[in-house]
Image: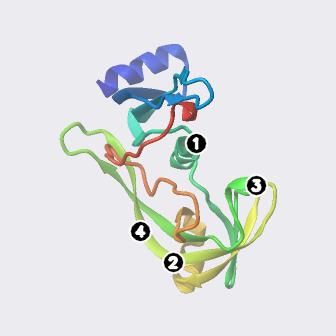
Amino acid sequence: NIAELARIGQRAGTDYLVTGELKKYSISDKSVTNPLNDEKIVRNKLNSIISLRIIDVSSGQIKFAKSYSDSKSATLDIINAIYPMTILSVNANNVVIGSGGDDIKVGQHYRVMSLGAELKDPYSGESLGRQETLIGEIEITDVQFKTSQAKIITGSAQINEKSRKGLIIRAPLDASASETSTKSKVDEKNSSTGSDQDW
């Protein structure tokens, strides 16, 4: 129960709880034979899918939920779900983003989202985050250690108009960019296969 988990988190003095459920687990035999002496070399491959949920202890809100077969993409997804990249300033057709480093690449396209009213689950009353509305698209032109610069491709008028109310950016639109979570969800059933080394 989410409410009970939130109470446990409050007693432990944490901000967020990460819970996981093992959805799939199997081991495949990938053994090979040494051609020199016919000796069998035992090799196994682990296939697993873990469903992760991030719970905001203070509000009881599910900040993020998704299934993974490896940890590499999960880390960035979780960070962006809790602390999405924000637009710090807008100057005509250019914006400054409050994120940089290796996770952002020049040429990537991102969606610009404006935040609306809070959404709640009609059955449990749990907060599902805020409504996000697509208002434009930007392209990264320069990446620094903590910030990045981008040019506005579409939606310049709306981005300039709503910049003072706070804007966030979501998943890269180009196919070559790494996949990130598009928004916080109560459940998502996307999955793929990976190796035992991923975890």
Q: Nearer the viewer, mark 2 or mark 3?
A: 3
Mark 4 Cα shell of 10 Å, populated few (<14), some (14-19), many (≥20)? few
Q: CA distance from mark 2 to mark 1?
A: 29 Å
Question: Could you say which disc has been placed on residue 72 in the image?
Answer: 1
Q: Give me the residue at 47% from left, 20% from top.
A: 9
Find numbered disc 2 in the image and state the secondary structure of the residue it sits on.
strand
Q: Nearer the viewer, mark 1 or mark 3?
A: 1
Ranked by sequence position, the earlier of labels 1 and 3 is: 1
Q: CA distance from mark 2 to mark 3?
A: 23 Å
Q: Give me the residue at 32% from left, 51% from top.
A: 119
Q: Nearer the viewer, mark 1 or mark 4?
A: 1
Colour pattern of the rendering = rainbow
Res. 4 visible in picture? yes
Q: CA distance from mark 1 to mark 4?
A: 28 Å
Ranked by sequence position, the earlier of labels 3 and 4 is: 3
The residue to which callout 2 is attached is 136
Q: Amino acid at mark 2?
A: Gly
Q: Give me the residue at 67% from left, 74% from top.
A: 107
Res. 57 visible in picture? no
Q: Amino acid at mark 4?
A: Thr
Q: Amino acid at mark 1?
A: Lys
Question: Could you say which disc has been placed on residue 196 in the image?
Answer: none
Find numbered disc 3 in the image and state the secondary structure of the residue it sits on.
helix
- Confirm or deny contact between disc 3 and disc 4 (CB under 8 A): no
Question: Could you say which disc has been placed on residue 101 in the image?
Answer: 3
Residue 38: give x, y in percent of width and height: 54, 24
Ranked by sequence position, the earlier of labels 1 and 4 is: 1
Picture quadrant where residue 121 is located: top left
Question: Could you say which disc has been placed on residue 133 in the image?
Answer: 4
